[in-house]
Image: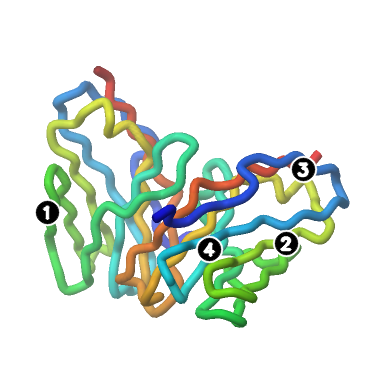
């Protein structure tokens, strides 16, 4: 049982390049989330999904797109990377989606945009 | 916008001492969770306290919640070097979304 995994672990992009971050969970969770973590800012929600085929915007969605084609996978895309998107990205999932439900986090992807 | 604000931002203590971290929030909540993040890792859930609870214990952890003051505290007793990490509070008022604070960085010196 791997829990939540993220690919890749590290990535360096040039401004304007695109990339996709992959999150996979093997806990059969309905709800999945993408956060970014910046120094001194804590975690901010980018997008989330309440089930296969659904996505919704979080607090800071601009510049990102997401897809949830399979229940176990949640993809985060950057179409045209900007230096402001340099951050550590975390994926999380849970089964009930309520504020009382534990979120399980992946190990993170450290992205640098030059 | 950030809902929770942890205080202090950083805390350094000797092994064996107690560590207390505080979290303040702005709007009404249903639940408050505390998470730990070791350096370079993802967050790990520690404990949940509901809005109708005042105190909760789990091992060496003690969490209190004062909804009238919109604040919570996390106490780690008899700290160990392995407790060195950042600690975040996360608040939830409805479904789906948790709002995380900026965290307290705890250093436990052996």
Which is nearer the N-term, disc 1 or disc 4? 4
Residue appearing at x 45%, y 55% in the figure: A105
Do the residues at discs 1 and 4 belong to one chain?
yes
Residue B107 in the image: above or below residue A55: above
Q: Which residue is mark 2?
A: A77
Label 2, label 3: how far apart the Cα atoms are: 14 Å
Q: Is residue B3 left or right of residue A9?
A: left
- Identify the residue position indicated by label 4 in the image: B1
Which label sits in the foreground, 2 or 4?
Answer: 2
Where does the image place residue A111, in percent across and percent down from the top left? Answer: 68, 44
Q: Is residue B100 above or below residue A51?
A: above
What is the distance, in whole Å, between disc 1 and disc 4 at their CAs? 30 Å
Whether the residues at callouts 4 and 3 have beta carbons within 8 Å, the answer is no
Helix, strand or loop under label 2: strand
Label placed on residue B57: 1
Q: CA distance from mark 1 to mark 2?
A: 40 Å
Q: Which residue is located at x 41 percent, y 49 percent? A: B43
| Marks 3 and 1 belong to one chain | no
- Mark 1 on the same chain as mark 2: no
Horizontal relation, residue B67 to residue B41: left or right: left
In which quadrant will I find the C terminus of chain A?
A: top right
Q: Which residue is mark 3?
A: A113
Mark 1 or 2: the one toward you: 2
Q: Is residue B63 left or right of residue A62?
A: left
């Amino acid at each position: 049982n791997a829990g939540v995994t993220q690919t890749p672990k590290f990535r360096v992009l040039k401004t304007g390049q695109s990339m996709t971050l992959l999150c996979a969970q093997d806990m059969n969770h309905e709800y999945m989330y993408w956060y970014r973590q910046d120094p001194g800012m804590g975690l901010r929600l980018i997008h989330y999904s309440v089930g296969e085929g659904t996505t919704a915007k979080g607090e800071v969605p601009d510049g990102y797109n997401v897809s949830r084609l399979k229940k176990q996978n949640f993809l985060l895309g950057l179409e045209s990377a900007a230096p402001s998107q340099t951050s550590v990205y975390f994926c999380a999932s849970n089964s009930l989606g309520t504020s009382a439900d534990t979120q399980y986090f992946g190990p993170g992807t450290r992205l640098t945009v030059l | 916008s950030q809902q929770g604000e942890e205080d202090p931002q950083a805390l350094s203590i000797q092994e064996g001492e107690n560590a207390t971290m505080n979290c303040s929030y702005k709007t009404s909540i249903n639940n408050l969770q505390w998470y730990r993040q070791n350096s370079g890792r993802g967050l790990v859930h520690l404990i949940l306290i509901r809005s109708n609870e005042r105190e909760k214990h789990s091992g060496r952890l003690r969490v209190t919640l004062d909804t009238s003051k919109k604040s919570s505290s996390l106490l780690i007793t008899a700290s160990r070097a392995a407790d060195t990490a950042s600690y975040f509070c996360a608040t939830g008022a409805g479904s789906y979304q948790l709002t995380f604070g900026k965290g307290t960085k705890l250093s436990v010196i052996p």
